[in-house]
Image (spheres, helix red, strand yellow):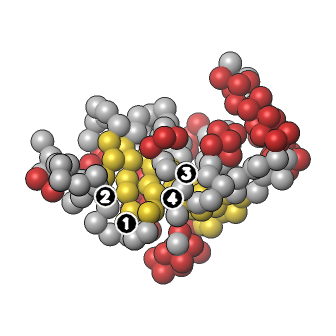
């Protein structure tokens, strides 16, 4: 049972304040949930997110940060408002089974990212910023790759990187070693 602070305030449209975000995210998944973070998501918290097997999303609607507790499949697009200031989601990866570095945005990440918000991935490597792909032909290419993956036909790593380059899909990794909380705050907005 959650604390009183975690129960939704029925007098407003605001999600509940999550007093302990780690406990909130660490409990077993029952349903999609959203809550307000009490503070800016610091480096320790963001480094911890990729250790969770369930996907996690964060978004900033100035001045408030929100957290989305999702299933192992994904954070649904409709739970991450496109008109947010900043969107962050975590990529969980089992290091021994990794074929493609988890800091690289997936075709779905590019296809679903916001064209108005700053888009980021938290991975075991750091924070990756990536930008929307708006060219219609490039978006069709992304959709084709997503559909192929749905049938279990994943593109080899080098071929995927070449594909991203061909459609001008950009990303920048900011490694944990080169970040501190002040730099992170400036980066995330």
Q: Residues within 10 Å of mark 3 (few under 14, many from 20)?
A: some
Contact (CB < 8 A) between labels 2 and 1?
yes
Which of the marked residues, 2 or 1, is nearer the chain's N terminus? 2
Q: Are marks 3 and 4 in contact (CB under 8 Å)?
A: yes
Front in this rendered view, residue 156 or 67: 67
Decide if residue 82 is on the left or right side of residue 115: left
Image quadrant assignment for residue 31: top left
Marks 2 and 3, how far apart at CA: 17 Å
Instruction: Point out residue 33 in the picture as x, y percentages from the top left corner.
Output: 32, 42
Residue drawn at 28 percent across, 36 percent down: 28
Quick one: label 4, few (<14), some, or many (20+) residues within 10 Å?
Answer: some
**Residue holding disc 3:** 82
Circles 3, 1 touching at the beta carbon (< 8 Å): no
Could you tell me which quadrant the N terminus lies in?
top left
On residue 36, the disc is 2
Residue 85 lies, with reference to residue 153, above or below; the image says below
Neighbour tally class for label 1: few under 14, some 14-19, many 20 plus, Cα within 10 Å: few
- Give the camera-side residue of 70 and 103: 70
Percent across and percent down for residue 184 are: 51, 73
Horizontally, is 116 left or right of 163 in the view?
A: left
Residue sitting at 71 percent across and 25 percent down? 147
Asked if residue 103 can be seen in this view, the reply is no
Query: Which residue is outermost to the bottom?
Result: 182
- Label annotation for residue 64: 1
């Amino acid at each position: 049972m959650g604390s009183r602070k975690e129960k939704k305030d029925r007098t407003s449209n605001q999600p509940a304040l999550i007093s302990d975000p780690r406990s909130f995210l660490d409990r077993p998944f029952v349903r999609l949930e959203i809550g307000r973070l009490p503070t800016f998501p610091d480096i320790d918290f963001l480094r911890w997110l990729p250790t969770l097997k369930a996907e996690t999303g964060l978004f900033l609607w100035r001045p408030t940060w929100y957290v989305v507790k999702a299933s192992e499949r994904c954070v649904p697009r409709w739970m991450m408002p496109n008109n947010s200031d900043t969107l962050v989601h975590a990529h969980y990866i089992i290091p021994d089974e990794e074929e493609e570095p988890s800091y690289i945005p997936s075709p779905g990440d590019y296809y679903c990212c916001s064209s108005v918000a700053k888009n980021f991935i938290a991975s075991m490597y750091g924070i990756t910023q990536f930008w929307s792909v708006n060219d219609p032909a490039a978006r069709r290419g992304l959709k084709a790759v997503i559909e192929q993956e749905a049938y279990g036909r994943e593109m080899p790593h080098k071929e995927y990187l070449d594909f991203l380059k061909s459609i001008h899909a950009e990303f920048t990794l900011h490694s944990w070693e080169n970040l501190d909380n002040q730099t992170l705050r400036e980066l995330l907005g």
